[in-house]
Amino acid sequence: MHDIQTSDPLGPFITRLEAARIYLRCHVATVDRYVAEGLLPKHKFGRKTLFLLTDVLKLVIRADVPDTGSGGPSGSTRRGRACSRPLPVALETLIFYVIAVVLLIRFIMLHH
């Protein structure tokens, strides 16, 4: 991590890439969306855009980060990190078996 210390008592700053990969574990476009939606304040130093580490950490622990990219109900929210919800176990199992059957059928068709 390349924390940039300034003489400002606000604290350490991090880059957009560090915010996305290390702390939020999301794509940098998601960080840009959070900035556009006003959820994450940015600080400009010349041509460089930086984020306060404390602001990024607040976003990580927020319970009301909007889920604008899922196409779900308008009231849906995400908890914690900016990532999608896991599939239900029954759906994962169904997908696994469908893929296994398709691969088995292809194998049988290719070897006859």
Image (cartoon, rainbow, N blue to C red):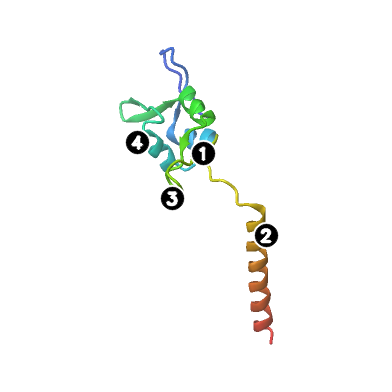
Residue at position x 69%, y 84% in the image: 111
What's the CA distance linking mark 1 and mark 2? 24 Å
Which of the image's four quarters has the C terminus? bottom right
Labels 4, 1: front one: 1
As measured in the structure, the alpha-carbon distance from the residue carrying label 2 to the one carrying label 3 is 24 Å
Residue at 40%, 35% in the rendered image: 34
In the image, residue 30 lies at what x, y percent? 43, 41
First reached walking from the N terminus: tag 2 or tag 3: 3
Element carrying mark 1: strand
Residue 59 as seen in the image, left or right of residue 106: left
Name the amino acid type tagged 4: Ala
Residue 83 vs residue 74, the one in the foreground: 74
Q: In the depicted view, which residue is nearer to us: 38 or 51? A: 38
- Single out the mark in the foreground, 2 or 4: 2
Q: Which residue is mark 1?
A: 78
Q: Badge 3 is on which residue?
A: 71
CB under 8 Å between discs 1 and 2: no
Numbered badge on residue 93: 2
Of mark 1 and mark 2, the one earlier in the sequence is: 1
Q: Left or right of 100: which side holds 73?
A: left
Amino acid under label 1?
Answer: Arg
Q: Amino acid at mark 2?
A: Thr
Residue at screen point 45% across, 41% down? 75
Q: Earlier in the sequence, mark 4 or mark 3?
A: 4
